[in-house]
Image: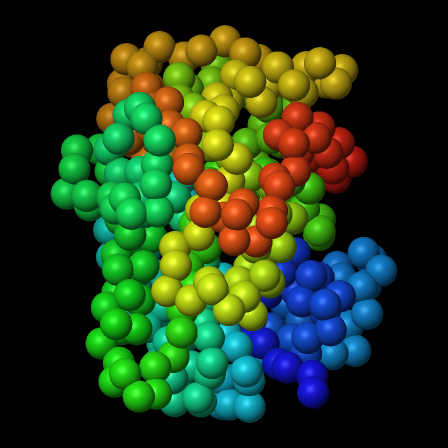
Amino acid sequence: MTETVLLTGVSGYIGLHCAQQLLEAGFVVRGSVRSKAKEQEVRETLAAASIDTTNLSIVELNLANDVGWDEAAQGCDYVMHVASPFAIANPKAEDDMIKPAVEGTLRALRAAKKAGIKRVVLTSSTISMMGSMKAGTVKPSDWTDVNAKDVSTYAKSKTLAEKAAWDFVNGQNSDDKMEMVVINPGAVLGPPLGRDITGASMSMIDQMLRGKMPMVPKSAFAMVDVRDVATLHVKALTHPDAASLRIIASDTMPRGFAEVAQILKDEGHKGPSTRLAPNFVLRFIALFDREAKGMLGFLGMNLGNDNSKTCQLFGWTPIPFKQTVRETGAAVKALQS
């Protein structure tokens, strides 16, 4: 029997790749968007990638209100909750990012529970694990201290949303417990499925290629290909031993922005710069620039990730980092006007 997945945030960078892999694996996908006006764009994007969208339907859901959530989850076997507000820049008011992240996650879980869903796969981030650590290796048991100095609003939102999800799942009655798996990606790169390169990762590559990043921050952390992130989401839906785990989705090695720029330069792109920005410059800029302020917590960071459990559980080998950067650069370059 064909199983149905409610996939929130289907029109996003990760969501589109999840939709592709779910449809190709034979699932029926009920994708959510904030506005039904996005439906045609989602269908055209997937069709352009030669993906059959016969088993795709689109519903309208908003992280900030209850309308439609119960109906969207009804009749589904799984929920893949990918939708979440994301920006490097700290918002003027922290709740503008934190509230929809936490409340949207709880809306998805409540609707899933009500609909008798078997398992929820939740997209979090290693940012909910790394906190204010500056060096070493991030492990699935680590948690970010949201009260630590310079922790960005985005890091707080992902940490608090994931903690709220675990509190919800662990607070269930044992007799009818809904399972949850959390996927914690590192910094996500990789070619987009659609034409949108306005998200944080694609925008950074776009700026590098255009020569608009004359200096890059001194920070390094483990990265991952968006196609691998989607693969692990799909595997986590049904793997019998994945329930109740936090799954690190990334390579192990810390990778800096300068390394990304150098790979792009080696591919013949003229714009990228490998010059490192002195920390004091970014701290000064952060006084009047919210995006720079959001980066402060990453300055001087040199963090790897322990993905041994992920590789062992799923028999997974990450796409090589150089391949990811090369293919991301080529895809973004082709989309630049």
The answer to which of 124 and 308 lies nearer the viewer is 308
Q: Residue at x 76, y 15 (%)?
A: 268
Residue 82 picture location, percent across and down:
49, 62
Q: Residue at x 28, y 13 (%)?
A: 280
Q: Relative to 331, is 278 on the left or the right?
A: left
- Which image quarter is the N terminus in? bottom right
The answer to which of 64 and 75 lies nearer the viewer is 75
Q: Quadrant of residue 289?
A: top left
Q: Give the colouring mode of the picture.
A: rainbow
Q: Residue at x 59, y 61 (%)?
A: 235
Residue 16 picture location, percent across and down:
64, 59
Is 72 located above or below residue 326 in the figure? below
Residue 41 picture location, percent across and down:
71, 64
Residue 62 picture location, percent across and down:
44, 73
Q: Residue at x 30, y 60 (%)?
A: 161
- Which image quarter is the C terminus in? top right
Q: Is residue 87 visible?
A: yes
Q: How many marks?
A: 0
Q: Relative to 259, is 39 on the left or the right?
A: right
Q: Is residue 65 visible?
A: no
